Amino acid sequence: MSAHWIAPLIDGALMGFVYGVAAMGLTLIWGVMRVVNLAHGAIMALGMFAAYLLVTGLGINPYLALAAVALIGLICGVGMYWVAVHRVISAPYLSTLLATFAVNMMLIGAGTALFTTTPRNLDFSMRTVRIGPLALPGARLMAAGVAVLLTAALYLFLYRTRTGKAIRAVASNRAAAELMGIPSAKMLALSFGIGAMLASVAGGLIATIFPFNILSGEAYQTRSFVVCVLGGLGNPLGALVGGLLLGLLEGGIPAFMPVSWVPVVEFALFVLVLLIRPTGLLGGER
């Protein structure tokens, strides 16, 4: 296989890691509290603008700014849970769906008023890494590296810390966890905050690669749904694998057909997985 074929596949795979991080936030919130967060894309857009303001306003390196972006996302997510989700957490799914949709509309409306829909970019570039005939964009390599580190950190947190085990207990059986003295409401708020943190970091990483505006998060939210179904809804590792597969598809499909067919193939696969293996390739809710 020539470099002409391999380079787009590697580009797509690197981008797939970022899709995986974005989808991990969505799948974590669903896995713990059975909430489909329709504000996920808006939170990603806020992550893009938080990175933009930190880099252009304070001159911070974009990758150092991600720590602040993560903290902002965590705080916003926890606040969002207490304001919009907590009161309807035990209501039918439609209530939480509408609650997060309302938050999405408020964030997009406020973001449009503050930043308009004018495209922005970080005006940041990294050296291209050359391996033989292959030229790999440094920003995508860094984004993939951060995504892998975040996945490892999330797994260590969920499986090796007392708080992470408490979150898993709440996800498994909320009533039993409360009987064991675990404050389930606080764990749910923290889970929502971590989901929002992952979305905002994914937004910050995307901002280092592509121009963006306040509406850019919607396209990545749609991809996150595809990734969650591919990997298994509720399974964070499945989200990373699903993101990698989606990235490979986006990199490989243009070699065989026009780019405009990419979303058609992606959503055909989405429907196919739902019909044949609705729990996803790795199974859901680990």
Image (spheres, grey):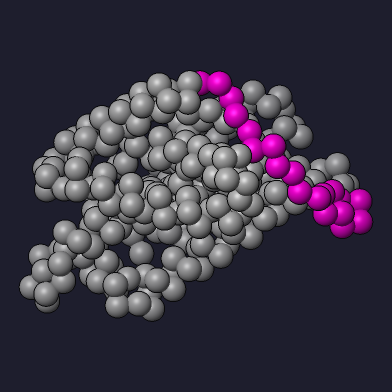
Closest to the observer: 151 or 139? Answer: 139
Q: Is 173 located above or below residue 246 in the figure?
A: below
Whether residue 127 appears in magenta in the rendering, the answer is yes
User: In this orientation, does residue 222 appear?
Assistant: no
Q: Residue at x 69, y 49 (%)?
A: 140
Q: Residue 255 at what x, y percent from top left?
A: 76, 34
Dominant secondary structure, magenta: loop
Q: How many marks?
A: 0
Closest to the observer: 72 or 249? Answer: 72
Quadrant of the drawing holding the C terminus: bottom left
Q: Is 277 located above or below residue 286 in the figure?
A: above
Whether residue 166 appears in magenta in the rendering, the answer is no
Closest to the observer: 274 or 83? Answer: 83
Q: Quadrant of residue 12?
A: top right
Q: Is residue 10 left or right of residue 279?
A: right
Q: Residue at x 28, y 52 (%)?
A: 78
Q: Is residue 203 left or right of residue 90?
A: right
Q: Residue at x 23, y 57 (%)?
A: 188
Q: Quadrant of residue 131?
A: bottom right
User: In this orientation, does residue 49 appear?
Assistant: yes
Residue farthest along the left direction in this orientation: 179
Q: Which residues are magenta?
A: 117-135
Q: Residue at x 28, y 33 (%)?
A: 103
Q: Residue 272 at what x, y percent from top left?
A: 47, 39
Q: Residue 252 at what x, y percent from top left?
A: 71, 40
Q: Is residue 257 left or right of residue 18?
A: right
Q: Is residue 246 left or right of residue 140?
A: left
Residue farthest along the front direction in this orientation: 58
